[in-house]
Image (tube, rainbow, N blue to C red):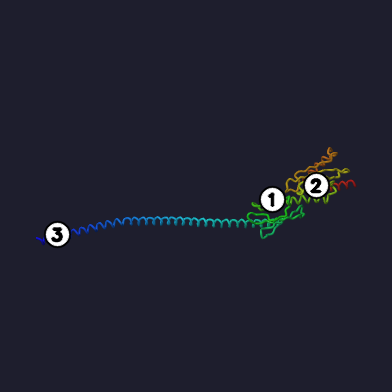
Amino acid sequence: MESANSVCQGGEGKGGVLAHLERLEAQMKRSDRKSEEPAAHTKERSLRAKIQELRRQRDQLRAEVKRRQTRVKASSANEDLNQTVEISEQEVLERQWGNVKAILQAYRFTGLSGKLTSRGVCVCISTAFEGNLLESYFVDLVIGKPLRIHHHSIPAFIPLEKIARAYLQTDIQRFLFSLCEHLNAYAGRKYQTDQLEADFSAFLTGPLQRNALCNLLSFTYKVDQGRETSSFSARLLYEDLTATLPTDVAVTCAAAEASSARWEEHRTSHEMLFRAKPLHQVFASFSKQVERLDLSLVS
């Protein structure tokens, strides 16, 4: 009986120890789980922070790539545009060269000539009137964008700047022709007055007054009319600066002769002559009339 009791007590002791051990293991596991939870949370937060940082870096890289692509496209577009502009400007310059050379070649017999220079072309304008070669002038043009006048010998009273503003950039041919018209007209008017003073000064009863442009003349003169001599005063205005004949003529007689019908007829005919013929040709006709009168008186 005693041995049986001791066996029972030993079994109960062993069972209690094992149970106690199991309880301790369970407590340790629970404790481990509790201690692991904060570390897991910390690791999770760290990983999330890294993920966010990586995403931020990714977004920055994407933005930088887009910016660089945009700059590359813009640079390519500007380069293409610059090349196009350069080609266009070169074409314009070549066209201007061609136009000038063609004009000079086509009109080399009309007093317009020129030679190429390192900057562009030097145009020479030779004036003439009634087949007489007169003064020559030059205009040194720089072929570029824009065209510009480098040097010239055009008289100050010729409206060169006005003509250049109107035509130089848009129509080089019209610029040169307009300048030729003004210079030839001025040379023609000057030639007429010079011829009058040189060849027909005997008709003048006072100095011939003229301005620098020779588009306003005034003088007094006498013409033999049979046995009498008539005195006249003339004022010639050339409003058209490209013309060699006056646009406005006023001829007056001396006060004592103005009331005479015959003097009025002479005055009117003189006005018509001044409007229709160059100045020196009018006085040449007066000279012929005097010669005919002299011959009739001798006969």
What x and y, as percent, mark residue 210? 79, 47
Instruction: Return the residue at label 1.
Output: 161
Q: Amino acid at mark 3?
A: Gln
Dot 3 or dot 1, earlier in sequence: 3
Looking at the image, which is closer to me, 292 or 9? 9
Residue receiving disc 3: 9
Give the farthest residue toward the front: 2
Q: Position of residue 54 (x, y in %)?
A: 41, 57
Q: In the rendered image, which residue does mark 2 sit on?
A: 209
| CB-based contact (under 8 Å), mark 3 and mark 1 | no
Q: Circle 3 — which element?
A: helix
Spatial CA distance of label 3 from label 2 is: 164 Å
Q: Which callout, 3 or 2, points at the residue further toward the start of the chain?
A: 3
Instruction: Identify which amino acid the numbered label 2 is placed on.
Output: Gln
Instruction: Point out residue 187 in the picture as x, y percentages from the top left corner.
Output: 76, 52
Question: Callout 1: 10 Å neighbours few (<14), some, many (20+)?
Answer: few
The reply to whether residue 110 is visible in this rendering is no
Residue at mark 2 to residue at mark 1: CA–CA distance: 27 Å
